[in-house]
Amino acid sequence: MCGIVGAVSKRDIAQFLLAGLRRLEYRGYDSAGLATVDSKGKLNRLRRVGKVEVLMEAAKKYPIQGHIGIAHTRWATHGKLTEINAHPHISENIVVAHNGIIENYKFLYERLYRKGYRCMSETDTEIIAHLVHWEQKQRGGTLAEIILRIIPQLYGTYGIIIMDVHNSNVLTATCSGSPLVIGCGMDANFLASDPIALLPVAHRFVFIEEGDIIEVTHCTIKIWNKFGQSVNRPEVEYFIKDDYDIESKGPYQHYMQKEIFEQPKVIKDTLKNRIINGAIIFPEFGQSINKLLSKVKHIQIIACGTSYHSGMVSKYWFEELVRIPCDVEIASEFRYRKFVVRKDSLLIVLSQSGETADTLAALRITKNMGYLSSLAICNVDYSSLVRESDFCLLIKAGIEIGVASTKAFTNQLTVLLMLVIYIGQIKGMNSKIQSSVIHAITLLPDYIEQVFSIEKGIANLSKNFIDKQHALFLGRGSLYPIAMEGALKLKEISYIHAEAYAAGELKHGPLALINMNIPVIVIVTKNNLLDKMKSNIEEILARGGNVYIFSEYNSGFIESDNIKIIPLFENIETIITPIVYTIPMQLLAYHIALVKKTDIDKPRNLAKSVTVE
Ligand code: G6P
């Protein structure tokens, strides 16, 4: 979602700010802007609806300069998608860019209105600019002091960078529920909502803690905590690998396509050094966690979106393989209900980005509620979720740019299955089952490579979906969440309404929908539920439905006018079928979106990182 970049330097920073915004594009946004103060003390602002590219074009036409500035990509929450609503916002000499939502902005506006302030935009952010301006006029002080005074008035979440045209050597910032990081450069300091924005210019970072207030000049960094006490925050070094080269799609047309095809490689990365002598090892865990895991009698998983689906698959694994009851819940539900903490329960927060607002909020409210411990499974090692959890396991998917998550999902599944076995090792799991699951895990990269060979067949099928408005996905057991994931991928990038059902629920409603215009995608493997699925398929065919069956060669299905079969393998270890069957779902959604010519990597209205509620 929204992204912020700020810079204060001895050199001109306008081009850097624009490049920083490009690096934040993957998070999702719909307008962009920047503001700088130049050497003559003049404020320059440029904003555009649409891509950063449009802003860059505008910057060529209306060159903008300055040694200090802030830039922003906006994902509209309050106020329509217009140039006037794009950030930064201004109140005379005060310039503000903001991520998050100020929930009580209307109330604040009423007060400011009475003092003579008028908003140009419909945003909650402009209120912050006016509030700072009013405070400065009334009581003076540095921006850091002013922030400390106004923070109690702001309800909501925020990462804010503020610049004062009358004191254009300092950037001031604060955050709560929306991350900010300082990048330390040479004769320059930078601020951003995501260190990725700063990679070309900084390798040393300071992560801002909740409520901190910071003041940076080109050569100094000052930090105060939410009580106004001066504090030191550790500086960490990050040298990001080549695969963070977010400019390059390589030979692929889309990032999503690239990320689908990267899966065998990144699963290998995830497995590396974690399977030794036939056992799962997590070197990052250390000894202390083993004692803790030996006590676990219940697992509570919290996640959103695609991560929620991987949690759902793991429920089948935890309960089947190690007999630990597992509950999985959507974070936005969990955080607002009066949940009961089970005895000896381990909390797992699952998130690709580690910045999803609801997941982070759920983690925060569970502190001191009685969970044995919290474990984050995440793709971003410097994320808030990782920093705020007791333990973490990193998936090694590399940066994921496509809004529709692909390689992060299969990596999450891989790590979850390994975690199940890891806990099984501690709790004395049957060694034969343990070895066979570990063996199956090692086969994953090869299996996924094999699935790629059916891409052409899937591409051909995708033409059948071009005029379809709806689709139904069916699965049973651990393939039911994969049906949900398949439906999610399709709706995200092709805009076809897609629903997933546990096939056993067909008679309880969805059968009423069946006709030849609603393709039914069935994911079925040769397990104890095969015959049940065959009956479900008969029920659909009997009502004139069209079925697309993704299954093994020898599952006993025969093609006909209204049955298309997409055969995958001869035999495959049942336990890993959810991971392997995900790939054709991703390819199907991708190819349908391709024929429908949608914006595959940045589907309309969606964001990669949902940092507001
Ligand atoms: C957004 C993204 C999804 C992602 C979800 C949860 O909706 O578009 O791809 O699954 O957020 O994100 P997380 O980073 O917490 O896994």
Image (spheres, helix red, strand yellow):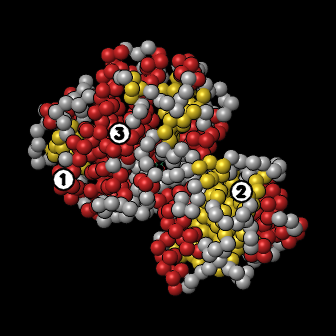
Residue 422 seen: yes
* Mark number displayed over residue 456: 1
Q: Secondary structure at mark 3?
A: helix
Residue 544 sits above or below residue 198 on the image? above
Q: Residue furthest right?
A: 139
Label 2 – label 3 distance at C-alpha: 39 Å
Foreground mark, 1 or 3? 3
Image coords of residue 85 (percent x, y): 60, 71
Residue name at image x 16 percent, y 43 percent: 565
Identify the residue shown where x is 29% and y is 39%: 445
Q: Earlier in the sequence, mark 2 or mark 3?
A: 2
Secondary structure under badge 2? strand
The location of residue 378, given as percent across then percent down, is: 50, 41
Tell me if 336 is positioned left or right of 520 in this view: right
Residues under numbered marks 1 and 3 in contact, where contact means CB atoms less than 8 Å apart: no
First-in-chain label (1 vs 3): 3
Q: Residue 382: x and y, percent? A: 57, 46
Q: Determine contact: label 1, label 2, CB under 8 Å.
A: no
Task: Name the mark on residue 335.
Answer: none
Give the quarter of the image for residue 413: top left
Disc 1 marks a residue whose amino acid type is Lys
Identify the residue at horizontal 52%, vertical 26% (top origin). Answer: 299
**Label 1 neighbour load within 10 Å: few <14, some 14-19, many 20+:** few
Residue at the front extreme of this rendering: 186
Whether residue 121 can be seen here: no
Q: Give the side of residue 417 with respect to residue 116, left or right.
A: left
Badge 2 vs badge 3, beta-carbon distance below 8 Å: no
Residue 268 circle label: 3
Kindly identify the amino acid type of the residue bearing the numbered disc 2.
Answer: Thr
Which mark is drawn over residue 174? Answer: 2
Q: Gap between marks 1 and 2, in whole Å? A: 51 Å
Q: Distance between the Cα atoms at labels 1 and 3?
A: 25 Å
